[in-house]
Image: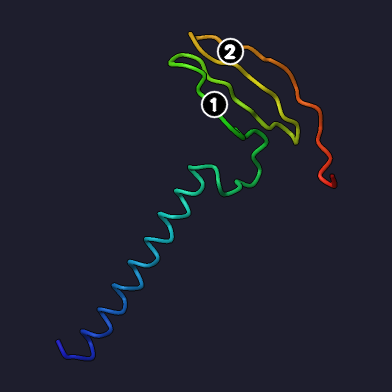
Amino acid sequence: MTTETGAWLQAAGALAAVLLLLAITARGLRWGGLAARPGRRLAVQEALALDGKRRLLLLRCDGREVLVLTGDGQAALLGWLPAQDDAA
């Protein structure tokens, strides 16, 4: 193996490592909810743990937001929130 071939292999390995890091970062952003997923209608906007068993969720569905209380194997719809004006 010549020096020139070794340099090409090193560059290819570095490129592969950078592409792998970008793919892992993109997947992490999608998993964390920070990157938009095209075609998705339902998303968890926020989640708040009230205690060890109960959780309050703010869900977005088709541009509207709803509050849901979960816990003890049950879920209760607390209500739809009024639409907010983005211009305000």
Task: Give above or below for 16 relative to 8.
Answer: above
Task: Give above or below for 73 relative to 30.
Answer: above
Are there few (<14), some (14-19), or many (20+) residues within 10 Å of tag 2?
Answer: few
Spot occupied by residue 48 in the image (x, y as percentages of width and height): 54, 26
Q: Secondary structure at mark 1?
A: strand
Q: Amino acid at mark 1?
A: Leu
Reading the image, the residue beneath label 2 is 75
- Residue 51 is left or right of residue 38, and the answer is left
Reading the image, the residue beneath label 1 is 48
Q: What is the spatial separation of the Cα atoms under label 2 and label 1, in whole angstroms? A: 14 Å
Residue at 81%, 36% in the rendered image: 84
**The N terminus lies in quadrant:** bottom left
Spot occupied by residue 10 in the image (x, y as percentages of width and height): 25, 78
Are there few (<14), some (14-19), or many (20+) residues within 10 Å of tag 1?
Answer: few
**The C terminus lies in quadrant:** top right
Residue at 46%, 50% in the rendered image: 27
Task: Give above or below for 25 relative to 8.
Answer: above
